[in-house]
Amino acid sequence: MAFAEYDQFDGLGLAELIARKKIKPSELVDEAISRAEAVNPKLNAVVFADYDRARATAKGRLPKGPFAGVPFYLKDIGAIAKGMPTRQASRFMPPLPSDHDSVLTARFRAAGLVLLGKTNVPEFGLVATTESDLYGPAHNPWNLAHSTGGSSGGSGALVAAGVVPMAHANDGGGSIRIPASCCGLVGLKPTRARITYAPDMGEAVDGLANDLVVTRSVRDTAAILDAVQGGVAGDPYWAPPAEPSYLDAIRRKPKRLRVAFALRRLDGGKLHPDCVAAVKAAAKLCESLGHIVEEASPPLDQSQLTPAFMGLWSGGLAAGIDLIARLTGAKPQRSHFEGLTWGLYQLGRSISVSDYLNGKAALQMAGRIAAKFHETYDVWLTPTLGAPPASLGTFDMQEADPVKSFAPMIEYVPFTAMQNATGQPAINLPLHWNRQGLPIGVQFAGRYGDEVTLLRLAAQLEKASPWAARYRKIKL
């Protein structure tokens, strides 16, 4: 294989080349590292390189998993890896290597993935762009002046740029789907508890967060979900039973679906015309494939849900920072953090237990409302973002007033946090680009526990409107 063809293969395609002995795992890893070193000065996507160990792993005996020998990066939040630090882009987190793998990381390794290092994130993954003080901004391969999204922004940049076919991501308010939208990728947030947080946590941010990957193909997403899904003994709750194989399931087209779509925010506000155009085009494509399509949205009250969500979000941040303080003996001070983080930390410490639990109850009620909506509609189609990928520097991470700092982000990301609140699966698909050549993703949300409908529909849409050739337009 000519190395120039490397980025024309998805992860399963590269694994097949290895299985057929067309190329060695060590050659693939060397190619990925070479590409990373060539583009990272422009993208600033890699924040920890573990290349010597990756090369040694690739030359050793690899597990016989579906992605045996495929290069892969972990996000610098979650997915704890032995020998690698996880700093979450915070000066308060010391750069100490972990002494163990999380279950998710162990499952990535068992799937045959070769871990190359860690990717750029915003501080503690709090915002919808990747521009921390510690690491600096990640740059979007489609236009270096624009954001990769957040918080899995470094992962999104590397996959879009063809460094690796997929990379780890996680999502507590849209952090898989937002970078997938900004970078033109597939990004599935699974159902709550589909992926375990063992052994270090029972859940993340009261169940708002979940992990998976960003990819270039639907089949890679299905295959990695097969490889890493499932709870373990001691988890506080489990997701509904999974498919025997999501990869096998997507080979069958979906039944005729009822698709609801949104052209306005939940509060009735307008969306950017590019985002409206993306939804209209996706709705028309669904209709051409035989699905029933109509405009509708669940009756969720964003004015009530936003403060409830922020209560859990800020409380979870405060608990995390206080845990770091206990483990390290360091006292949190304003100088350790960006302004937004410090303001949110103070808010989290001020919330009463009563307010916290009432906020949690409000989000649980949103889950009931969404479930009722999905008695009528199989999926809900929205733009993933309220506007095209933002220019770097748009958001002020030094504003310590959480209301002021998050107000523009709530307008930018009007839909994705809903599925974190309800626990539903949701997937970003790269079906639209605007006249400026920037990706405009659309999101499909499904019933709780029903990733298979989303993946089958995604595979059908990918076949009807393929996006793989788009990546060849990126020139760095």
Image (cartoon, rainbow, N blue to C red):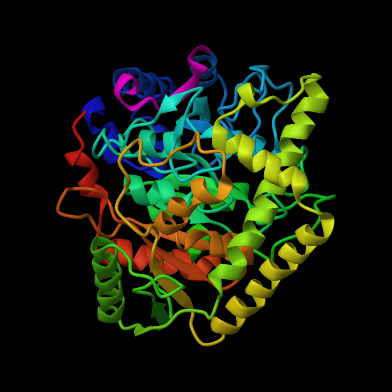
In this view, 70 is above or below 227: above
174 vs 35, nearest the viewer: 174
Residue 197 appears in the figure:
no
Q: Position of residue 356 (x, y in %)?
A: 77, 58
**Residue drawn at x 55%, y 64% as measured from the top left:** 418
| Residue reaching furthest to the top | 52
Report whether 154 appears left or right of 229: left
Q: Position of residue 35 (x, y in %)?
A: 32, 23
> Which quadrant does the N terminus fall into?
top left
2 vs 432, nearest the viewer: 432
Residue 49 is a magenta residue: yes
Q: Position of residue 277 (x, y in %)?
A: 23, 67
Q: Position of residue 174 (x, y in %)?
A: 50, 53
**Residue drawn at x 56%, y 86% as measured from the top left:** 375
Tell me which segment is drawn in magenta. 40-52
Give the quarter of the image for residue 475: top left
Residue 379 is a magenta residue: no
In this view, 196 is above or below 59: below
> Which quadrant does the C terminus fall into?
top left
Q: How many marks?
A: 0
338 vs 140, nearest the viewer: 338
Report whether 320 appears left or right of 178: right
In this view, 262 is above or below 311: below
**Residue drawn at x 55%, y 53% as measured from the top left:** 173
Residue 14 appears in the figure:
yes
